Structures are given as structure tokens and as C-alpha cells.
Amino acid sequence: MEIDYEKGTLLWYWYEDWIVVGGFAVALVIAVWVTGRSSWNVGGLLMKGLMIASVLAVLPLTLIRLGVDIDVSDDSTLGYLSLVGAIGSLVIGLPYLVISRPIKDEEWVRRIMPAYRTAAGVCAHYHNKMTVDTLAEEQMTAISLVAQELPPALKAIQANSWPRSSEARRVRRGIERALREYISSAKLAMSLFAELPRRHPNTAVWESTSRDARGAIVARISLETSAARQHMADATAYFNPTTWTYSEQP
């Protein structure tokens, strides 16, 4: 149908200046965002329904403006409906996104915090022991601790649903990447240390093993975990450890 709003009116500007198309795009983006962030309880289903209704309200006039022939008997009602849909998506959707972000992130943080604290403690111990001045037996103990403790911690974090905010999702990806890198570096360290007795057959005990040989292993492991250390630091900053009790500190 051909839309003919009175020139100079709100609906005329809304339609003739293609603002309706922009309004539809905004409503669609907000609807997708809210739908992805809201849960499947009563409140979440209500938000999903409202956002879908907003998009559907703007859709007919948008299609007509784009050249699609749709038979509509009352173009004024169609115009005001599209306005209500676009404005409604902003008025309802944006506050929900702002309010729901910290709530959803806090829920996710509470779920993964036990596993994260365990992993952070193991990683911190690993760094403290992987130095040239540390006894080789202590280094091997730290390496074994990484190999034993981090895989279950990683699985526990992966078992939780993804957080809602993009920042928390970035933190989660960083944690997972860091733990995989730590596990890989521990396996590498174990294999490198296993070669030392063959390369130094006259060594009676670990502590008398060539300092230079152990130093080369430590340097390589430090390089392997450089990115992982940054990911864990970012996660710790996000989790705000100043609120942790003394017993929670890694």
C-alpha cells in the first residue's frame, strides 16, 4: 500500500526520513541482546515477549518503507504502533540491560569462585617455585601440583554457564586459556626435567643438577606462561580480590 501521512507531522518525518528503518534496527538489536541475556523464568520470558512484540510492532511500516507491498487499512494506527514499538524497546530494554549486567555477573562469579581461587593459588605457587634459586625437588612438586589440580579446576569453570556481559565472557575465555597454558607448560617442564638425569648422569641428587640446565628450563617455562599470567591478573582484577577474606586469598 502507499503511505501518505500529512506533511510536517511526526508520522510524516518518521516515515519519509527513513527513521522508521533505523528504529526497527535499534529495536531488533536491543531485542536480540535482551533475549540472549534474560533467563527462562517468568520475568525473563516476559522481557523476551515484550522485546519480540516491540520488533513486530515496527516491522510492517518498515517493510512498506523498504518497498514491500502490504495491505493495511489504517496507516495512522500502523505509524503510531511502529513509534510505540521502537520507543518501547528503548524504554524497557536499555534499563533492563543496565540493571541485569551486574546481577548476572555476580551470579557467575559466585559460581566459579571456588574453582578460580584453587586455580589461582596453584598458579601463584607455581610461579614462586619456578625460579633458578628454588630447589629442583620443590620445582617438581609445584609442577606436579599444576598437573593434578588445574585440570579439575578448569572443568569446574567450564561446567558453569557463560556469564551475560561481554566483559565477563572475555574474562572467562582468558581464564580458560590461561589454565590450558599452565597445564601445557607443566607437561613441558616435566618432560624437560626428565631429560636432566640423562644429560647429567653423574648427578647424585636434584640439588646438584647443573644450575645452567635448570635455569634454561625455568626461563622457557616463564616464557610459556607469560600470556597466562596476564590473563589470570586480568581475572583477579575483575573479581575484586579486596573483598576476599584472608582464607580466600590464593
Image (cartoon, rainbow, N blue to C red):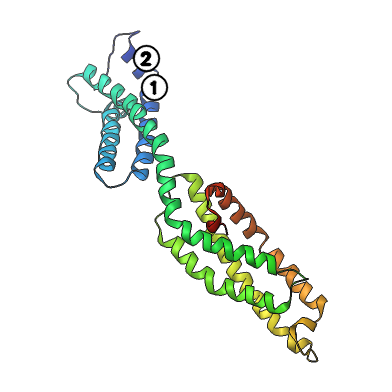
Residue at 51% over, 45% down: 167
Residue 11 locus on image (x, y percent)? 31, 15
**Label 1 residue SS:** helix
Amino acid carrying mark 1 in the image: Ile
Amino acid carrying mark 2 in the image: Tyr
- 26 vs 235, left or right, is left
Residue 138 locus on image (x, y percent)? 68, 76
- 135 vs 42, left or right, is right
Question: Which image quarter is the N terminus in?
Answer: top left
Residue 127 locus on image (x, y percent)? 67, 65
Q: Is residue 93 above or below residue 108?
A: above
**Between discs 1 and 2, the one toward the N terminus:** 2
Q: Can residue 164 be seen in this view?
A: no
Query: Are there few (<14), some (14-19), or many (20+) residues within 10 Å of tag 1?
Result: some
Q: Can residue 28 be seen in this view?
A: yes
Residue at 42% over, 35% down: 98
Residue 27 locus on image (x, y percent)? 36, 31
Q: In this view, does 64 lie above or below 114?
A: above
Residue pointed to by mark 2: 13
Q: Is residue 209 above or below residue 223?
A: below
How many numbered callouts? 2
Residue pointed to by mark 1: 19
